[in-house]
Amino acid sequence: MLYLRAAAGLLPTRRPSTLPDRTLTQSGVRVDLAHLAAYDRVCGFRLSDTLPATYPHLLAFPLAMRLMVGSDFPFPVIGLVHVANRITARSVRADAELDIAVHADNLRPHAKGRQFDVVAVASHGGSEVWRGVSTYLSRSASSAGASPAGASPAGASPAGTSPAGTSPAGTSPAGASPAAGGGRGPASTFHPPPASAIWRVPPRTGTDYAEVSGDHNPIHTSRIGARLFGFPKPIAHGMWTKARCLAALEGRLPGEYTVDVAFKQPILLPARVSFHAAPTGTGWEFRVDGKRPHLAGVVTPP
């Protein structure tokens, strides 16, 4: 139903010029342990009695979609580009009862349109234990032919796309600058850092993640759907890529941290990509690359 409402949002209509001043909430959310186990398998996490830092994003996703398909939202959800995501997380037990709240914030101009944040907060016992900030770009008509390199009309989907500026924290994640190998020049001039690991991303990654995340955007699950948005093949969800990076660092991360990523070129499925991670003294820098950069991120203290 949410995707039908998203499609209906493409019909011409008058929209407000500001973000809605409302917060959607859901109380008493409990994790289905079988679902959590399926998510862990898809993203590469070990089975644990604590939640991966990216898992509460799934719990908040239905509320975020409800917010963005509302008639009081200034942009149609189909066509939005997810350009960055920041998560601040504490160790949360899998059996914890959570209260989820989602709102939109910080509408601001961008060279290619306008950006805004969707802020999701999970609380336990009245205390905040998780916060996620997803930054989206709505491209203006005048810049429709000049979208960020590799950007996908993601329709609120966390698809891997080019960065549209800075991360939600206001700082570029590792490798986001051209000097660090995150430039947008020809693929032949791109030289990623030495790989810590090589990952083979199978063609079913999009459908597998769609099943556990609830994000069934056809650019991730259907060749026809991907082609309708200019991709030759389905692309991996950006939030799957972020989760896969954190899974690779599992056991080396503190109990509390902030992880900030910029989504770059989408990963066309199937793919062979390199993962690079390096300690920074206070955290980690990491990135995923193919012939072009796909994701760059940094883990810092909260």
Image: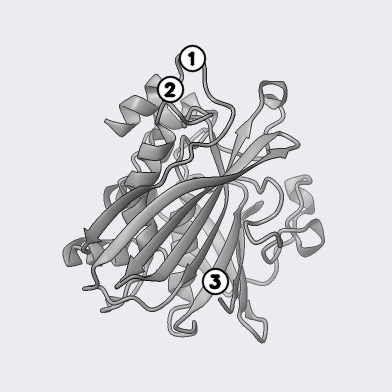
Residue sitting at x 70%, y 59%:
170
Residue 267: image x %, image y %? Answer: 53, 48
Q: Which residue is mark 2?
A: 9
- The C terminus is located in which quarter? bottom right
Instruction: Give the distance between the C-alpha atoms of the residues marked 1 and 2, in whole angstroms.
Output: 8 Å
Q: Which residue is mark 3?
A: 258
Instruction: Identify which amino acid the numbered label 1 is placed on.
Output: Thr
- The mark found on residue 13 in the picture is 1
Instruction: Identify which amino acid the numbered label 2 is placed on.
Output: Gly
Q: Is residue 85 above or below residue 222?
A: below
Residue sitting at x 18%, y 62%:
32
Q: Nearer the viewer, residue 242 or 53?
A: 53
CB of mark 1 within 8 Å of CB of mark 2? yes
Mark 1 neighbour density, 10 Å: few (under 14) some (14–19) many (20 or more) = few
Residue 36: image x %, image y %? Answer: 25, 65
Residue reaching furthest to the right: 179
Q: Of discs 1 and 2, which sits in the foreground?
A: 1
Q: Judge whether residue 48 can be spotted in this image.
A: yes
Quadrant in the picture for residue 161: top right
